Image: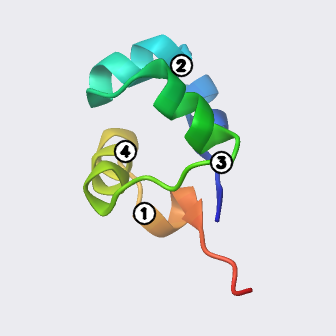
Amino acid sequence: MKNRLRELREEKGLTQEELARILGVTRQTIIAIERGKYDPSLRLAFKIARFFNRPIEEIFIYEVD
């Protein structure tokens, strides 16, 4: 699954550490999501979407295999 997390985070001028603190996760989690190495839980995906005030589908792009 691709995502726009890095782009949205940078638009807000946040570091990975700052976003991690806001969302209650580790910086490593943010790094892994941004690199496409980790798909967040549904709960975390909703938290991210709510923080950026966007639908989940605008942040996380599901690609059929």
Query: Dot 3 lies on which element?
Result: loop
Q: Which badge, 2 or 3, comes first in the chain's sequence?
A: 2
Q: Is residue 8 above or below residue 39?
A: above
The residues tagged by marks 2 and 3 sit, at their Cα atoms, a distance apart of 15 Å
- Name the residue carrying label 1: 56
The kind of residue tagged 1 is Ile
The residues tagged by marks 3 and 1 sit, at their Cα atoms, a distance apart of 18 Å
Q: Is residue 39 visible?
A: yes
Q: Which badge, 1 or 2, comes first in the chain's sequence?
A: 2
Which mark, residue 48? 4
Query: What residue do we see at 74% from left, 86% from top?
Result: 65
Q: Which badge, 3 or 1, comes first in the chain's sequence?
A: 3
Query: Dot 1 lies on which element?
Result: helix
Q: Which badge, 4 or 3, comes first in the chain's sequence?
A: 3
The kind of residue tagged 4 is Ile
The residues tagged by marks 4 and 3 sit, at their Cα atoms, a distance apart of 17 Å
